[in-house]
Amino acid sequence: MSEDGHHPAAMSPVEQRVAVLEALLTERGLVPEGFIEEITRRYELEIGPMNGAKVVARAWIDPQYKQRLLAEGTAAIAELGFGGLEGDHMVVVENTAAVHNVIVCTLCSCYPWPVLGLPPAWYKDPPYRARMVREPRTLLAEMGCHLPEDVEIRVWDSSAEVRYLVLPQRPPGTEGMTEPELAGLVTRDSMIGVARL
Amino acid sequence: MLVDGIHDLGGMQGFGSVVHSPAEPAFHDRWEAVARALMAVVAGAVEASGGEFRHSIERMEPGHYLTSSYYEHWLTAAATLAVEHGLVTRSELEARAGGRFPLSGPVLALPVADAGPDVGEPRFGVGDRVRVRDWHPPGHTRCPRYVRGKAGTVVRVDGTHSVPDIEAHGTARRYEPTYSVRFDAAELWRDGQRGASVHVDLWESYLERS
């Protein structure tokens, strides 16, 4: 749409094809009223990395929760009210001083929706999917995550039903912080494993 | 004949840098949300399994796949399934679009009539050495090309899940255990990076004892 909102710009070819399919399926009565708005609302407001950040912050302050999270990810995440599609079989992998974990989906774009939301474009595009399994150390460094040579890298390719979440290390100097303050430190990238905190 | 799809990108070279952004909206434009919703509509109407849905993207023409965005993949797949299941026709799509409406290529695998018995008891345990079968099925599979023929170690045994290679091609289903298998980078790549391993989640029938 143009800036004043009165003169819609010409549709791009893909936008036009979406409109064609939408019209045909709507004419056949297959698109329930308000369905598209419902999808938008659900993915824009209800899920996102703010959910995963709460899980991480809880694990940082509660050792018993952390233990449950690493042993039975799905159930521990459900304790905080998160779960559902693409989050039914969660495995949480822990970063330590010696081990760094990172998630990829080489075949498509599998991603733990309930805790991280929908995947960013770069996660779904060919460079990340092609390179993370072959040259993780190089690619992580290119993305700003410089790991000492002696840190082991574990790449997790989400090729079946399990979806992964990285538990980042708690940053030093955060001892006095509250759980919500800690959650505010946790980034999407740190839970994918392309950044350290 | 396209046997191994363009989607199977692990280890391919020449794609360049990752164009990273620290935060993104769920949808960059309204049409992306519409495309997502339409796929949900079509998949629901035709009762597509996860395997059939994924395969409808994997069958895209390789050049189109690599030059189009994620939600254009979904649109193409939704339109393809809608045509294949008789919800709309290709000529209707093209008439309204005023030209070509690219769809995914045909299914090359035969429908699976007999899925065989479910497998309840895992054949492998944590620590077992396994080798991935070196095969090139004509249909959908979740066995990435870069691990085929490679040896690794089972690090986790997960529950039983429907085999995608079967569910993508008909109504038959077979449930099998899946495993997380750890491969050293050196086993996968001649130029494998030091101190790195890749874990791939694989169905039992993709594996044999090593």
Image: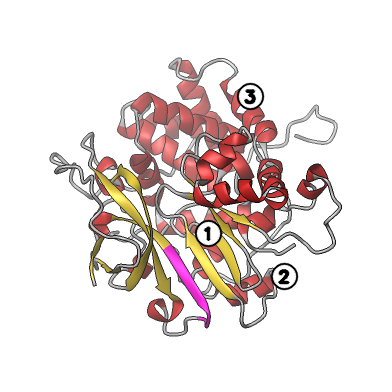
Residue A70 seen in render = yes
Asked if A181 appears above or below A172 in the picture, the reply is: above
Label of residue A37 in the image = 3
The disc, 1 or 2, on the residue closer to the chain's N-terminal end is 1
Quarter of the view holding residue B179: bottom left
- Whether A67 is among the magenta residues is no
Residue that mark 2 sits on: A144
The disc, 2 or 3, on the residue closer to the chain's N-terminal end is 3
Label of residue B200 in the image = none
Secondary structure under badge 3?
A: helix
Query: Residue drawn 72% across and 57% down?
Result: B21
Query: Residue drawn 42% across and 35% down?
Result: B79
Q: Nearer the viewer, mark 2 or mark 3?
A: 2
Q: Position of residue A197 (x, y in %)?
A: 75, 62
Chain letter of mark 1 equals: A
Question: Which portion, as a residue range, is magenta?
Answer: B193-199
Q: Is residue B95 left or right of residue A82?
A: left
Secondary structure under badge 2?
A: loop
Residue that mark 1 sits on: A104
- Whether B196 is among the magenta residues is yes
Characterize the local packing of mark 1: few (<14), some (14-19) or many (20 or more) Cα atoms within 10 angstroms. many
